[in-house]
Amino acid sequence: MKELLYPVVIRPLSEEDGGGFLATVPDLPGCMSDGEAPEEAIINVQDAIATWIEAAGDMGHAVPPPSTDLKLAS
């Protein structure tokens, strides 16, 4: 697996939402993927990150740098 440069947040999905796990990338608005297990969601979100960055470049938008200090709400 490639090293993740962007922080990823993993959370379980409810049964109403199909179950499994959702992976979101706070630095890249709207960038997300899912999987049956947390590990699968992380693997899948790597493709979403690459696609997000490519689409931003195609549209001439800046790509934000990865956060180095993601903080969790308490």
Image (cartoon, rainbow, N blue to C red):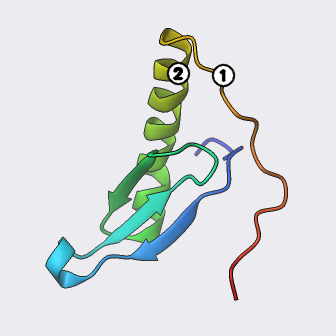
Position of residue 51 relative to residue 35, above or below, is above
Residue 42 or residue 59, whichever sits in front: 59
Residue at image position (58%, 46%) is: 1
Residue 51 location, x and y as percent? Answer: 45, 28
| Label 2 SS | helix
Which residue position is annotated with label 2?
A: 56
What's under tag 1, amino acid-wise? Ala
Residue at image position (50%, 19%) is: 54
Position of residue 30 relative to residue 7, above or below, is above
User: Pointers 1 and 2 in contact (CB under 8 A)?
Assistant: yes
The quadrant holding residue 64 is: top right
Residue 37 location, x and y as percent? Answer: 38, 70
Residue 12 location, x and y as percent? Answer: 39, 78
Q: Which numbered disc covers residue 62? A: 1
Q: Residues within 10 Å of mark 2 (few under 14, many from 20)?
A: some
Q: Residues within 10 Å of mark 1 (few under 14, many from 20)?
A: few
What's under tag 2, amino acid-wise? Ala
Position of residue 53 relative to residue 32, above or below, is above
Query: Going from the N terminus, do you reach mark 1 or mark 2 first?
Result: 2
Residue 21 or residue 68, whichever sits in front: 68
